[in-house]
Image (cartoon, coloured by chain):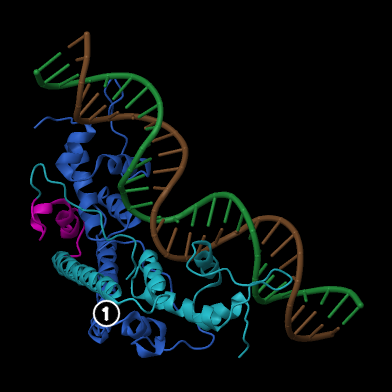
Chain colours: A cyan, B blue, C green, D brown
Amino acid sequence: MPNDVSIGRAAEATGVKVPTIRYYESVGLLPRPPRTESNRRLYGEPDLARLRFIRHARELGFEIEAIRAMLDLQARPELPCAEIDALARRHLADVTRRISSLDGLKRELERMINCCRRGRVADCRIIETLQHHELCRHHRPAPDARRRPTKGRGQRQ
Amino acid sequence: MPNDVSIGRAAEATGVKVPTIRYYESVGLLPRPPRTESNRRLYGEPDLARLRFIRHARELGFEIEAIRAMLDLQARPELPCAEIDALARRHLADVTRRISSLDGLKRELERMINCCRRGRVADCRIIETLQHHELCRHHRPAPDARRRPTKGRGQRQ
DNA sequence: CATACATTCTCTAGTGGCTAGAGGATCAAG
DNA sequence: CTTGATCCTCTAGCCACTAGAGAATGTATG
């Protein structure tokens, strides 16, 4: 395996798509690599390792900023890893919250589907269920309370 | 309760934020309401019901386009509801997939955290785990296969 | 060597589902 | 009459990419 590879080979080797590699460079997650005399990027093994790290962390749902923090910490191996540990724990808590939320959702969807008599739209219980919030598991909103904290967005899986 | 309410009252009554109501109007999910002579929107009970429907469906993770489809179907109550049923079933399958994916992720995060000896970064197993893909549950990529279907993004919960 | 096709470059714009802010008009209460 | 809340439109920003244009190189084949 060659020491310096093109962006296409790097994409192949790491599973990160070519435009995404360039995107990571543009947001400073990946250092600007040296170029050939015809201006093409050349990546070495450390870059590939960094890309694999980023990809894996993204697959695990870590945000770009969290990955940036981990990469910064990684560059200072003499520091204690409490921060990374805390990051992972926060993320785990978030994942757990999302799972339980999805579980409730799944149950409600199943109930909706079971209620559907496969008749006409006029009798469809799914639509009815979606119209009347009080039929479902969500707690009723207090008259002045603001629900939907609008947090925890933008992550996949 | 008044028959025609301002956008702020509508937001209060439905739990959909004011800018979000305007956004829904801009993308055609909500019809353009009549206005006062000073150009302010006036919503009636059917609009509020529609907004509650949209909000609930969004909370359940349905995409805007799916909601649009349901609202269109809702307007033709003589049609069979097979489409809505299929929509809900597809969505349920998606939710189930996301849950199992998150479950795997949760297990890996727990393992990572358990491996962290809370020592120095140099010895942090979390970073190590994230660097070496072969340590984790994901199947190894075939040399020419494209993983990460990049589908199922953009939904909350 | 010529040609064809693949890869790469930079740049801009689009995605979804909102959210934030500017700058101005209007309303309700004291 | 003044203050502050609410409303209007419009534009831009968010995240993490993805898609496409248009041009320049690289590689494989005849």
Query: For the magenta stretch, what is the residue range?
Result: A117-140
Q: Is residue B144 left or right of residue C9?
A: left
- Disc 1: which chain? B
Residue C23: image quadrant is top left
Q: Above or below — where is B123 with respect to C8? A: below
| Residue type of the residue flagged with mark 1 | Leu
Q: Is residue A137 magenta?
A: yes
Residue B65: image quadrant is bottom left
Q: Position of residue B9 (x, y in %)?
A: 17, 35
Residue B26: image quadrant is top left
Total numbered labels placed on residues in the image? 1
Q: Position of residue A91 (x, y in %)?
A: 26, 70
Residue at the spot 37% in from the left edge and 44% down from the top edge = B27
Q: Above or below — where is B104 with respect to C30? A: below
Q: Is residue A96 left or right of residue A57?
A: left
Q: Is residue A64 left or right of residue A48?
A: left
Q: Position of residue A1 (x, y in %)?
A: 60, 91
Residue at the spot 12% in from the left edge and 46% down from the top edge = A145
In the image shown, does A43 or B59 lie closer to the viewer?
Answer: A43
Q: Secondary structure at mark 1?
A: helix
Q: Position of residue A67 (x, y in %)?
A: 38, 70
